[in-house]
Image (cartoon, rainbow, N blue to C red):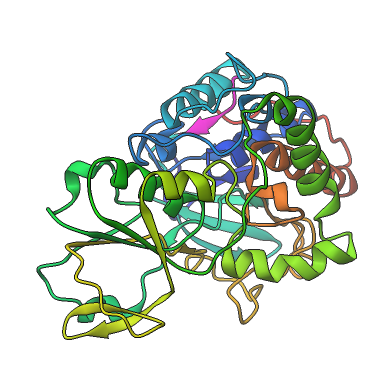
Amino acid sequence: MSSIQDPERVGTVVIGGGQSGLSVGYHLARRRIPFVILEGNARVGDSWRQRWDSLHLFTPARYDGLAGMPFPGDPGAFPTKDEMAAYLETYAARFALPVRTSTRATRLVRQGDRYLVTTTRGQLLAEQVVVAMASYQKPRIPAFAAELDPRIAQLHSSEYRSPAQLRHGPVLIVGAGNSGADIAVEIARRGHETWMSGRDTGHVPFRLDSFLARHLLVPFLFRVVFHRVLTTSTPIGRRLRPKVIARGGPLIRVTPADLAAARVQRVPRTIGAQHGMPVLDDGRVLDAATVIWCTGFHPGFSWIGLPIFGADGEPAQERGIVAGAPGLYFVGLHFLHAMSSTMIHGVERDARHVAEAVARRVRSTTADPLAAIQPAA
């Protein structure tokens, strides 16, 4: 590895070795563009392995495969988080993608006409950089959490693994999206009195595992509505995007009937603390033994030292391409281009679009675009 004084030169650096980064890598390799992928974890797929034990994807397996390799097994099943991790690791190996594990990007700045990427293993000087990371990087927890009684156990959803972590007694889930609903059902079924607090984000109005849904409704929902109708290219998609980013999407697999059957109690938003206890929007004070914050994440892009962000913390981009910073791209962001952008099949489309933009720029700036075509080791 080159020293800090002499950065290693790489054509394109892809930051993030999850489904977004691997998908970008696949398309770059097909276009014979030299690149490396930086993955902060020790193994490809670790970001999935580190999530809660019972997690299943919200989408059926037929929509969970990246380009060139369908997801194995029953196409109608919902893969576990460990199955998804194993799939990504196998994908990287099958296509010999140049992933550098245990290499976390800590700073990204402009240096002349290139980008300087500082990592935990040295520096790289790149002509182009793809930030292939989801918007789920830094847990978002409200400030009033510090006012809760220390006897109340507090976990963010990123720290939750199983009900064994919970204290004896009632549990308050703050956040009514897909993660909150999944965790709430699991905890309630283990015998905890469970409240799920937050705005109703809506739900898919049918069960995904029914015969009609599997063969007609699910393909229409995922391939048409989420993928082609609700996009930044349509008026309805542009109107809906800010709401989805702020409040989350509808419940996909867990239904209100599932919540009711598990005896999960729906309650209003949690807005503060009173005498060390959480307070709801309607004034009720809940005597919770554990609070799980399913309140989302900050993008976590403070390590990017470039003037590309708006007041909302989101990068100014169009379909992943940053006009204000030529050669810089994003893949994996929530509703990057469509409602499906955080789903595997949506990530794949976004990655292909960005990879083609990278290739166009290489062709426009390189006299011999096929020179030095081998990816860095």
Asked if 230 appears above or below 276 in the picture, the reply is: above
Q: Which residues are magenta?
A: 96-100
Q: Position of residue 163 (x, y in %)?
A: 23, 43
Residue 7 visible? The answer is no
Q: Is residue 55 magenta?
A: no
Q: Position of residue 302 (x, y in %)?
A: 48, 69
Which residue: 49% across, 24% down?
A: 89
Q: Quadrant of residue 266?
A: bottom left
Q: Is residue 359 left or right of residue 314?
A: right
Residue 152 visible? The answer is yes
Dominant secondary structure (helix, strand or loop) of the stretch shown in magenta: loop
Q: How many marks?
A: 0
Which residue: 63% across, 19% down?
A: 95
Which image quarter is the C terminus in?
top right
Q: Nearer the viewer, residue 106 or 64?
A: 64
Q: Is residue 370 left or right of residue 75?
A: right
Q: Nearer the viewer, residue 200 or 89?
A: 200
